[in-house]
Image (cartoon, rainbow, N blue to C red):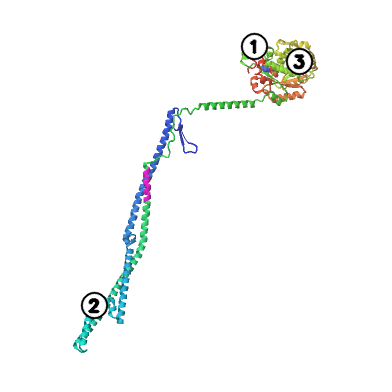
Amino acid sequence: VLSRLSVYRKGSTYVINIGFTSEDPVKAASLANAFAENYLLEQLDAKFDATSRANSWLNDRLTVLRAEVRSAENAVEVYRGQSGLLSAQGSSLTEQQISDLNAQLIIQTADYNETVARLESVKAKVARGDAADTIGEVLASAVIQTLRAQESTVAGKRAELSSRYGPRHPEVLKVEREAADVQAQIQQEIKRIVSNLESEVGIAQQKVRSIESGLNRLRGELSSNNRSLVRLRELERDAEASRSLYESFLERFKENDDQETITDADARIISKAVIPSTQSSPNTLLNILLGLALGVAAGLGMVVLAEMLDNGLSTGADVEREIGVPFIASVPKLGDGWVNVVRNLMGKTQMPGDFIAENPLSMFAESFRTLRSTILLSDSDKKPKVVTISSALPGEGKTTIVRSLGRLSAMSGSKTVIVDCDLRLRQLSKLSEVAPKAGLIKYLKGDAALRDLIVKDKKSECDYILNSENEYTNRDLFGTPEFGKLLTALRRKYDLVILDTAPILLVTETREIARQSDAVVIASRWRKTKADAVTTATNILQSVNANIIGLVLTQVNMRTRRKYGIGDYSYYSRQYGKYYASPIKETVG
Ligand SMILES: Nc1ncnc2c1ncn2[C@@H]1O[C@H](COP(=O)(O)OP(=O)(O)OP(=O)(O)O)[C@@H](O)[C@H]1O
Ligand SMILES: [Mg+2]
């Protein structure tokens, strides 16, 4: 199943494509959707797991932290109790006591100072002997006031008695004593008041001292308290740190706890897979196009390969470019089509040479008309009469050309003779249906007359000079004067003398024949004979000063050729096909 699943990220987006390939479109869509949903579920599960794991960890941590906070805060309280640093409104007890005592000290000191001042002033007045009335303390005393009242009563009595009695009168003396007694009592009272003040000063002083000593003690206490305070603050900080850590964990825990209940997947489904309406594979159109492209490529490859392997001559342009001789004509290839196969089976073998007699208007015949007129026009001064048909290699169609050209020429009204100069194969002789009285060899040896040589063609006015079957020689007969004489005789008697020869590259005699001819035509098999071979043959002919008038491509498949041969008349053969009336199909290549 997984191999049919395709998951890929779309470009650089965060979109993930999930596809599933199946023969059943409904199944494909539902499976793709199922994969997407499962993916989301799994993501949720994973997230849920992660948060609950985090929560349990946080929970553990919280328990530990809570214990830590408790013990830290406990330590603070215990220490505070031990060190007496009980806090009240931000200040310690000692500090408060000190401030209280300070306030008392101020009051008591003022009180003391005032008492001392009063004592001093009273003492000073008493020492100066000032009237007791000027001393406020004395005036305020009830005892003094009573005594002052007695004093004035006694003074009144004394004044009354002194006016009546003499100073020695007992009554006067008695009053005098009373007055002195009152006065003594007043002095006594003043003394008492002073000593009273003195004791008051003493008490005030005592109070001040006690406050001061209290303060001193408290100050000592405070300095030791401050040392304890440092420790206390330390403990408090510890407790504070533990608490804030605990609180932040607690916060986190609460958040997580919330998350655990409302976890969301990171991914969501943008669009569900729909049931596809067309198949994804095989892509018929693509396959057809691919096949087409491959086919075309292979075809092109084959063509290129064929072109590379084929270094024969293909067009007239090839001939002129590669061989450097004029191109004359293309002789169509005859009959390897099914029509001829049937004819062959029926025993009616038709030789290409016979074709022209039966189909004088064919394209095949036309190529020989071209050849003929090229030969005739090749020299404007004197018409070439002796024409050698040669080729570099065997089987290039020389004999076929000779027979066809001979017949055509004869049919065109020229007196024509064709001579079988191929002493080895003697094809022309073999093809002929009539035997001569004497063969060419016999004549060249000087053993026969010209008129014994000549035989008439059955199908045309063309004359033949042939070889007899059983004659053979190793002598070079073409270098003899007899051959020259033969040509002269033939020139006189005929308009056109066509010589069939052996291949140049194989048989040396051909050079001699070519040398003595007026014109030489090279036959070369279309796309078969290598250009190198043709060039070599051409060079040989040129070295004996043969007059090469051009080259004929033979056995040309016109159908194929049409596609190549731009520049040849044959290229137009399709358009002008109606000009070539032919009872049988000539090119069925
Ligand atoms: N235009 C043509 N169409 C079809 N077949 C042809 C054509 N020309 C020649 N042939 C065939 O090719 C073969 C060789 O041809 P031909 O004998 O004319 O060549 P050649 O050059 O005379 O050969 P050789 O060097 O052996 O004498 C023959 O079987 C002939 O029938
Ligand atoms: Mg031949």
Give the amino acid type for the residue marked by disc 2 in the picture. Gln
Name the mark nearer the viewer: 3 or 2. Answer: 2
- What residue is pinned by disc 2? 145
Give the amino acid type for the residue marked by disc 1 in the picture. Lys
**Residue farthest to the left?**
170
Confirm whether residue 497 shows in the render.
yes
First in sequence: mark 1 vs mark 2? 2
**Region of the chain picked out in magenta, as a range:** 247-259
Name the mark nearer the viewer: 1 or 2. Answer: 2
Mark 1 burial class by Cα count in 10 Å: few <14, some 14-19, many 20+:
few
Q: Residue at x 24, y 77 (%)?
A: 145
The N terminus sits in image quarter: top left
Mark 2 burial class by Cα count in 10 Å: few <14, some 14-19, many 20+:
some
- What residue is pinned by disc 3? 496
In the image, is residue 194 above or below residue 354?
A: below
Image quadrant assignment for residue 476:
top right
Pinpoint residue 152: horizontal percent, then vertical percent: 23, 81
- In the image, 53: left or right of 460? left
Mark 3 burial class by Cα count in 10 Å: few <14, some 14-19, many 20+:
many
First in sequence: mark 1 vs mark 3? 1
- What residue is pinned by disc 1? 348
The one of 194 and 57 positioned closer to us in this rendering: 194
Give the amino acid type for the residue marked by disc 3 in the picture. Leu
User: Gap in Å between the C-alphas at discs 3 and 2?
Assistant: 204 Å
